[in-house]
Amino acid sequence: MNVGSAGSAPWVIGAGDPSATLEIVLQKQTVVLSWHQFVYAEGDSKQVRMAFASHDVVINGAGLDPLLSAIAARRVVSLRESVRAERFSAQAVRFINEIVVRRIESELLLAPE
């Protein structure tokens, strides 16, 4: 496995076949999503948005642009919010300061009787 940056990396990229799941480690919980439900991703060095069939994920930080190609190949195994000290380190070129995971609520449309 490769890491996204030196030291305590904010993401882990698998070296072999695409991963079956994506683990998102938040400050108070962990969410595991299936790559089979991945729809698309977009972003730049400061923000990456990912859409799954059941969840939307927004990643805010710095140095995130290399993450997009790994997402496209479904090789990201884990994402982790950086702790405060990592964000303010002089060596922190890549960090994730916030990950927002939002469940998509499906609305069932019922036909009138």
Image: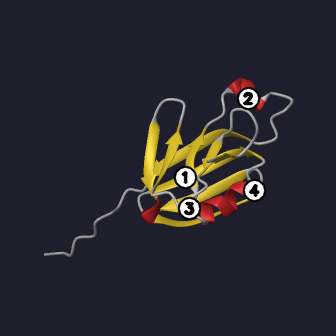
Tell me the CA gap for discs 1 and 3: 15 Å
Badge 4: residue crowd in 10 Å (few <14, some 14–19, many ≥20) = some
Can you give x and y, in whole percent of width and height, for residue 72 in the image? 61, 66
Q: Give the mark nearest the N terminus, 4 or 3.
A: 4
Badge 3: residue crowd in 10 Å (few <14, some 14–19, many ≥20) = many
| Colour scheme | secondary structure
Kind of element beneath mark 3 = loop
Hey, which quadrant is residue 27 in on the image?
Answer: top right
Contact, mark 3 vs mark 2 (Cβ under 8 Å): no
Looking at the rendered structure, which numbered label has been put on residue 26? none
- Residue that numbered label 1 is attached to: 57
**In the image, is 57 to the left or to the right of 46?**
left
- Residue that numbered label 4 is attached to: 65
Q: Give the mark nearest the N terminus, 4 or 1.
A: 1
Select label 1 or label 2 by which is in front: 2
Front in this rendered view, residue 48 or 23: 23
- Three-letter residue code for mark 4: Asp
Q: Which residue is at 43% across, 64% downward? A: 37
Looking at the rendered structure, which numbered label has been put on residue 74? 3
Looking at the rendered structure, which numbered label has been put on residue 86? 2
